Image (spheres, rainbow, N blue to C red):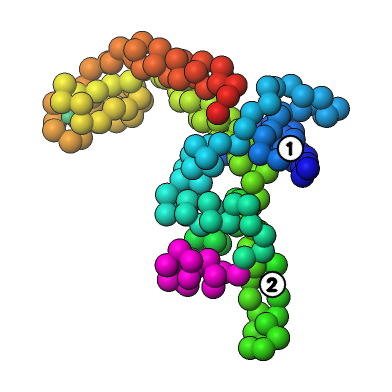
Amino acid sequence: MIETDVRKFFMLEEGVQVDRHVRVIENAFVFTNDKGEAVSKRQRITEELIKNVVSELVGEEAIPIVFYLRGKKQISEFIIAEELDLEIHFTRNLLYRLLEFNIVSFIRKKDRIKGWYICYWDFNEHMVPYLAEKMRLSKIARLKDRLDKEQKFDFYMCRNACTRMPFEKSMEFNFKCPECGELMHEQDNARTKEFIQTQIRELENKKEF
Ligand SMILES: [Zn+2]
């Protein structure tokens, strides 16, 4: 049984630091507190979850590589390229992009016959739930930031909805739309605020990925 504890501090784009602990046991994971006690239900690392994380952070084109590496150990990048029928530079490029998020890792070994170094790659499956959680927290932080702006400012917009800007900025334009020249009016943003609040609630209640 492979058990991996990942304890990470997230630094979200907004400078908010969050502490999260994830324990991965084979193909399942739980979030734990700092004493190592489970604070969430045990969930499986599903193909769906892997696809979501990889496509959002790196791109859909990297998905086949990850699934090819899943369950294998130390695979040479030449083998990956050959097996997936991909160009070696393209393969390397995707691997390095996956490496940026620690989704994969590698070791370099010298090829005894050819005398050059070859990278052998592994898929770090334990990073998936951690990254999914980080994505969820980042989205909540961004939405809260947007909601904050919606609550603080009055927004102005022309009837053609070309642009939308806060009061101060629309004053600079004498309330004339810079795109079409029509007069801009204050826009009721109650619905926008409601929409953002719903999204935040949904993400906050999302206990399962
Ligand atoms: Zn306009």
Q: Nearer the viewer, residue 103 or 68?
A: 68
Residue 82 belongs to the span the image colors magenta? yes
Q: Foreground: 135 or 69?
A: 69
Residue farthest to the right?
A: 35
Percent across and percent down for residue 182 are 13, 26
The residue where tag 2 is placed is 108
Magenta residues (range): 76-89
Q: For residue 150, which quarter of the picture?
A: top left
Three-letter code, disc 2: Arg
Give the mark, 1 or 2, whose residue is nearer the N terminus. Answer: 1
The image position of residue 66, as x and y in percent, is 54, 53
Position in image of residue 69 (x %, y %): 58, 56
Q: In which quarter of the image is the N terminus?
A: top right
Left or right of 72? Residue 168 is: left
Residue at horizontal 42%, vertical 54%?
Answer: 61
The residue identified by callout 1 is: 25
Left-right relation of 39 to 142: right
Q: Residues within 10 Å of mark 1 (few under 14, many from 20)?
A: some
CA distance for labels 1 and 2: 27 Å
In terms of secondary structure, what is the magenta stretch mainly? helix
The reply, left or right, for residue 132 in relation to residue 88 is right
Per the image, is 168 magenta? no
The residue depicted at 42 percent of the width and 67 percent of the height is: 85
Q: In this view, does 114 lie above or below 119?
A: below
Q: Position of residue 52 (x, y in %)?
A: 48, 39
